[in-house]
Amino acid sequence: MIKRTAEGIILFRKPKRLEIRVLTDKIVNVFITDKEEKRKDTIAVEKKSYPSVNFEVKEENGKLFISTKSLDIEVDMETLFITFKDKKGNIINEDYKEVVIEDSEVKCYKRLREEHFYGFGEKAGYLDKKGEKLEMWNTDEFMTHNQTTKLLYESYPFFIGMNKTHVYGIFFDNSFRSFFNMGEESEEYYYFGAYGGQMNYYFIYGDDIKEVVENYTYITGRIELPPLWALGNQQSRYSYTPQERVIEIAKTFRKKDIPCDVIYLDIDYMEGYRVFTWNKETFKDYRKMLKELNDMGFKVVTIVDPGVKRDYDYFVYREGIEKDYFVKDKYGITYVGKVWPGEACFPDFLQERVRNWWAEKIGNFIRDGISGIWNDMNEPAVFETPTKTMPEDNIHVLDGERITHREAHNLYANYMALATKEGLLRERPNDRPFILSRAAFAGIQRYAAIWTGDNRSIYEHLLMMMPMLMNIGLSGQPFAGADVGGFEGDCNEELFIRWIEAAVFTPFLRVHSAIGTKDQEPWSFGKRAEDISRKFIKIRYELLPYIYDLFYEAYRKGYPIMRPLVFEYQKDENTHNIYDEFMLGENLLVAPVYLPSKERREVYLPEGIWYDYFNGDVYEGGKYYLVDAPIDKIPVFVKEGAILVKQKPLSYIEEEEIEEKIVEIYNGEKGKYLHYEDDGKTLNYKKGNYNLFNIEFDYHEGEVNIKFEKLHFGYKGGAKKYRFVLKNFNGVRRVIVNGREVENYEIYIS
Ligand code: GLC
């Protein structure tokens, strides 16, 4: 029996029921069950409903056909096999075996069609996951992460399949421990499934990888614009204490003229690791410290873990017990697990009333001058247990329904981040919230930036940072970074230099290191490292408008900021598994040195002409080069026709209003660029208080024709002057800006 619904169809083939919803021409939701149950969306899915789409349904020879403008979907009414075809009748993706639906397992098989697989979020290993076996279960992995490490802190049950003819994504919206076998078991099929929950997935088609990511983030949401200061350089360690040390670090940045915007306070600022408290001895005058830091232009981000110390004299614990806010064990007794403060209880963030309570705590806590919150240990991590977390049969309550930790585990961090975000907004309703989270589930980009947890001060982890951050970016989370210099272990001079050179081109830039390790500030390794760090951090601050434009693009389209070459050059097979080069937006290609004692490295440049960012050397693309990279140089290339908007480097982002921006135009036939600008801190951009400029040029017979137009002008406080700089042009006879021949290439905004 078939039932047509507003969004699609329901097909009954006892005992199974298949629901297909057409969400856009290219996005289809598939839900198969054998129970009397409704489809359950997790927190990853942003929308509750979608605008209606035209599609046709037809039944013929035991098959059901659903067609949209871009897709033909065929369902075999006997086996419920689904085949997705393009409009020319070519298969994009098809089922291989019947879907398995059991209480303890659901599983869906797809035929392999020579795909490369990307996405899967925070995973060790290289870029392409073809032939691999993966699992999703948020885990505080404190052993050294390596190629064989299966579980890390975050879970994104999303992948992109790309072969010569098609590209698509599958988002499996199931929060239980899930698994993905991408051809490790067979050359004919791959499968994905979970140990519980529903077979509920989204098939996401696109003309290219870009469109698949755009469509995926149409479902799971996109980042909001972060405060600009969160794009600056950030310094952390476990832990800066006492408060005098924090001030000393801050002053040293200013004295040494190394730009820095944020200082982190790790767990030792608290009284016995009790969240929402300050250590009475080491942070006696914390208000004064916060004020001093703020006066120097530093934002302060404090760590807030979920574990609430079990101590009846402690107000947070007492309130939590009295109001019944904590996660329960299977007998209904408040669960106690050990984390930093010893025995602790864990707020059940899945409940709205608990989030409200937490939000109030956050709001009160930040009042004295804290600008952002760092959520750690939110897998949730629990010490002294073989599973590193709480028992799977613990009980949470979600929308009035009791669910087990098995289902709640991977979602815990997103709900905690949601509560934290509400808290920040409660205290400062018009300021952009900043949260940094270690654990995550798909959709985390709507609440928090992430970092990749406890890496080590080893070259392998400088390398691992690249494919990991790129796949996280392809999984909808553009705001991500790794602990610069490595967390565990002692960093050394050369490694620190190589790491900072690479990291300034990643979306989130923070140095962090573990307790007991050697100092890891840019000046801790001698003058050479200090000078090189300063130089590269300043390069990042110069590129700030360009980087912010990428955040704007991520906000609009969900594109990654740091992206693999395949994202831009999908047709070029050489790019398909390049994991040790990356692109910052579409214009910059970065090829870090990630091994010791190397003064040169191999670099692949895709088609077109490329310019060395530092000395303008010209390279013809489509080739491999051995490029010089002495210790103070990282190979960075600019694409022909690129437009880069820059500004002078400040010591911190809010140091002064930027009066002048520099528009660098790189030689090429033509180029086009969107430049975005707003106040960088409030939510007023949502009300239209922003500027958007279209910058375009073409170059013919010695004539550079530049167009600079306001697409939107709603923010008066932006740069007043745009200065154009032509890069790598030779033989220019005339420069025309907006139809007028000019000599100094400047535009004044009014
Ligand atoms: C965890 C975090 C690390 C932090 C430490 C102490 O290991 O991953 O970043 O410094 O806890 O809070």
Image (cartoon, rainbow, N blue to C red):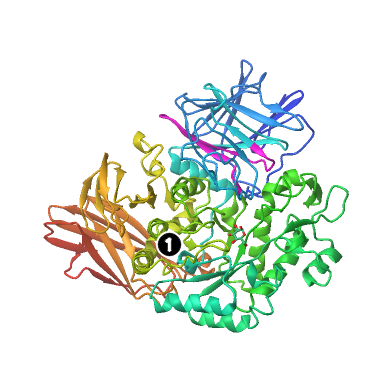
Q: Amino acid at mark 1?
A: Tyr
Of the pair 183 and 5, the residue shown nearer to us: 183
Residue drawn at point x = 11 percent, y = 57 percent: 731
Residue 260 is at least partly visible in this image: yes
In this rendering, the answer to whether 125 lies above or below 661 is above
Dividing the image into four quarters, tell me where ligand 1 lies: bottom right
Label 1 belongs to which residue?
A: 548
Quarter residue 269 falls in: bottom right
Q: Secondary structure at mark 1?
A: helix
Q: Position of residue 283 (x, y in %)?
A: 63, 78
Total marks shown come to 1
Of the pair 452 and 369, the residue shown nearer to us: 452
For label 1, the crowd category at 10 Å Cα-Cα, with few meaning under 14, some 14 to 19 and many 20 or more, is many
Magenta-drawn segment? 153-178
Q: Position of residue 317 (x, y in %)?
A: 80, 67
Q: Position of residue 510 (x, y in %)?
A: 49, 62
Quarter residue 209 falls in: top left
In this rendering, the answer to whether 134 lies above or below 611 is above
Q: Residue most toward the top? A: 61
In this rendering, the answer to whether 565 lies above or below 363 is above
Of the pair 281 and 536, the residue shown nearer to us: 281
Residue drawn at point x = 39 percent, y = 45 percent: 580
Q: Is residue 160 magenta?
A: yes
Q: Is residue 80 magenta?
A: no
Of the pair 556 and 419, the residue shown nearer to us: 419
Residue drawn at point x = 47 percent, y = 54 percent: 554
Is 584 on the left-hand or right-hand side of 91?
left
Q: Quadrant of the N terminus?
A: top right
Q: Quadrant of the C terminus?
A: bottom left
